[in-house]
Image: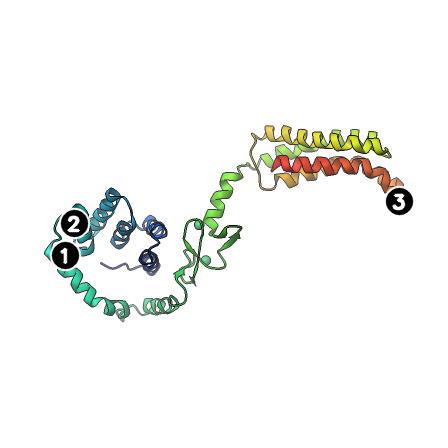
Amino acid sequence: MDVQDPRMRSLLRQANKVADSGKRAAAEQLYRQLLEEDSEVAEAWFGLGQVLNDATEQKAAYQKALALNPEYAEAVRALAELRGEPVPAWAEAAIVEEEEEEPEVETAVPPQKSSVHEHTAVSVADEEVYEFVCYRHPNRPTSLRCYNCGKPICSSCAIKTPVGYSCPDCIREKEDVFFTAKPTDYIIAPVIGLVLSLVAGYLVSRFTLGGGFFTYIIMFFVGGIAGRFIGQLSKQAIGRRRGRYLPQVMVSMLILGTAIWILPYLLVGGFGSLIIFLGPGIFLFVAGGALYSYMK
Ligand SMILES: [Zn+2]
Ligand SMILES: [Zn+2]
């Protein structure tokens, strides 16, 4: 019984290689990934059995392999050894025979599969330099692996993180856990944020434009409280969900809601009188920071 699909064959070879190098957890992952795509690959069940730690799970894997191919000598032997039973003589003989044949099997590919042959020849040659092939691009050899799940990734799929290279699947999985905001949250929260910012901006512009030192001190406190308050209210309205861009969107609403009241003064007074905007400026700076960190 042979694996016909070139992609499956490449995955299987890769998994066997990882298993041979002693990386059992990474190999297990690869076998499982392969079996998820095609659960009828006896070799993958056998390989999985070899890298599992739990004897019951190992037995189950070997039995799966044998259900698909009852004459799978290695699986028969492994299962017998696991059960402490004698290995049937025919299985031992078959394994010895196969081991003698193996070098030939590796290199000689039937001539009728010429396109497959070319493909195999290329990847075998490349594997001398690169250890694996990318799990998303089976034709791209690579030596990179995802630090999290151990899957091989090519350089264009690898995403650099502070702890190492990650595959796109693992990145997405982590983000999905963290960012749960629904599309409507991106409407509800900014609308609430804008309304509150308009109120706050109006009051701030009324009481601080041209204000002196005392106003600046007050704006430090008011800004912090206002930013937090706006964040709290809008976050409550969206069920405390997080959105990847929500902090930026909310700060934009705050700037918009405040700037609208200051703009007329700016147009009349020009930039020459910038000092009168110091009060609102401090407010925006402190409130924006508080809002941003609250929404994060
Ligand atoms: Zn790739
Ligand atoms: Zn990964």
Q: Mark 2 points at which residue?
A: 80
Q: Distance between the residues labelled 2 and 3?
A: 90 Å
Q: Where is residue 221 in the image (x, y as percent from the top left)?
A: 74, 30
Identify residue type, mark 3. Answer: Gly
Identify residue type, mark 2. Answer: Ala
Quadrant where the C terminus sits is: top right
Instruction: Establish whether ligand 2 lies closer than 8 Å to the Cβ of label 1.
Output: no
Q: Observer-nearest residue: 41 or 273?
A: 273
User: Would residue 129 be seen by someone viewing this image from the given angle?
Assistant: yes
Check disc 2: other Cα within 10 Å, few if <14, some if 14-19, many if 20+: some
Q: Mark 3 points at which residue?
A: 272
Q: Quadrant of residue 214?
A: top right
Mark 1 vs 3, N-terminal side: 1
With 203 as the anchor, is 133 left or right in this view?
left
The image's colouring method is rainbow
With 274 as the anchor, is 294 left or right in this view?
left
Quadrant where the N terminus sits is: bottom left
Identify residue type, mark 1. Answer: Ala
- Residue contact at pointers 1 and 3, CB within 8 angstroms: no
* Residue name at image x 86 percent, y 45 percent: 271
Q: Mark 1 points at which residue?
A: 91
Q: Is mark 3 on a helix, strand or loop?
A: helix
- Residue contact at pointers 2 and 1, CB within 8 angstroms: yes
Q: Where is residue 7 in the image (x, y as percent from the top left)?
A: 35, 59
User: Would residue 256 be seen by someone viewing this image from the given angle?
Assistant: no
Check disc 1: other Cα within 10 Å, few if <14, some if 14-19, many if 20+: some
* Residue name at image x 87 percent, y 35 percent: 210
In the image, residue 41 sits, relative to residue 103, either above or below, namely above
Mark 2 vs 3, N-terminal side: 2
